[in-house]
Amino acid sequence: MKVMQLLPALNSGGVERGTLDLARALVAAGHESVVVSNGGRMVEQLELEGSRHLSRPIHRKSLLSLRQVRPLRQLILAEQPDILHVRSRVPAWLTYLAWKKLPAGTRPRLVSTAHGLYSINRYSAIMARSEQVIAISECVRDYLLENYSGHLQRPPEVIYRGVDTREFHPDIQPPAGWRESVEAEFPALRDRRWLLLPGRLTRWKGQEDFLQLLAELDRDDLHGVVLGGAEPNKQHYADELRQRAAALGLGDRVSFVGQRNDIRYWYSAASLVYNLSKRPEPFGRTVIEAAAIGVPTIGYNVGGPAESLRACFPEGLVENGSIAGLRDKTLALLESDARPVLQGEFTLETQAERTLALYQKLMAEPRRGPA
């Protein structure tokens, strides 16, 4: 097969990681992989791993982007892919408008992946109008069925995002001197059991609940680690969190370590990992990464993270917003031998296999007219 994935850019994020993961799997399986985007720092890795990148300005949320429909149609005609796979709303609109004018008997099959719980409007509905929608969780599938059933050509197929078990596994060992280097940078971490909350700093990710939990625990042998950075326009929230920690008397019991590229070693060093998103998220990547390493994880029973926890470590579920529940669960798991087990449906290998099988099934079906 020849598969063309289309997304706004290749800088960072879950959509981008998913694109590179699938591109790598396509190449490994002997298929041809092409990615169309406005470019970014991940292009070099994509090309080193055997895919081709075609740079096109398909990222701007503007009516002027409609000028890209005709050039995109010409590109599709020139490349002759078997599959067009869109992963974001602006590229999805441009690709759909280009695709529906192609001859129905010979045009590529059109696939979309719904990575989020999109706002309910006509603009977002484009993610449901492909020939086959992939939902990254049952949470997303149910959201699409509830809000976009009139646009779906068939029920969405759930294919979970997968963790790379070559990078995240129970036998992982940090590089020599890693812990010493971390403790030199953050001396308060020495001789403590780490409670780790990974995730970007934003109000609904639960950092304030985590700080309140640490205050409720009031134990000197435990140290909270908030791993993640704030976006440029959210730096004030990072300052608020530090002020809140000081007000709760947590000065020497929590460390804000910022964004890290070595998160798997932080997982392996932690006694417990937390996912405290207070509103439904489409998926819980930190949950499955921690599960792959075998670290007990605690999370609120809401959205995609709860779905991952129910599959891999139901012992870690807590009622949404319950600080008392977090405290009791933390104390119980610190004394428990319970460990998560990563289920096969959450591996990168399974994700790739199921996506390729979906492509092949779609290619074998008769083509339909555009919705």
Image (tube, helix red, strand yellow):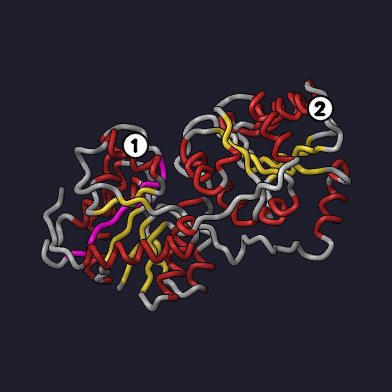
Left or right of 198: which side holds 225?
right
Q: Predominant secondary structure in magenta?
A: strand
The answer to whether residue 236 is visible is no
Residue 88 place in picture, x, y as percent: 37, 48
Residue 217 place in picture, x, y as percent: 77, 28
Residue 336 place in picture, x, y as percent: 71, 43
Would you say residue 108 sits in the magenta stretch?
Answer: yes
The answer to whether residue 351 is above or below residue 146 is below
The residue type indicated by label 2 comes to: Asp
The answer to whether residue 101 is above or below residue 90 is below
Magenta residues (range): 107-116
Tag 1 residue: 143
Would you say residue 134 sits in the magenta stretch?
Answer: no
Pick out the residue farthest to the top: 247
Q: Secondary structure at mark 1?
A: helix
Tag 2 residue: 218
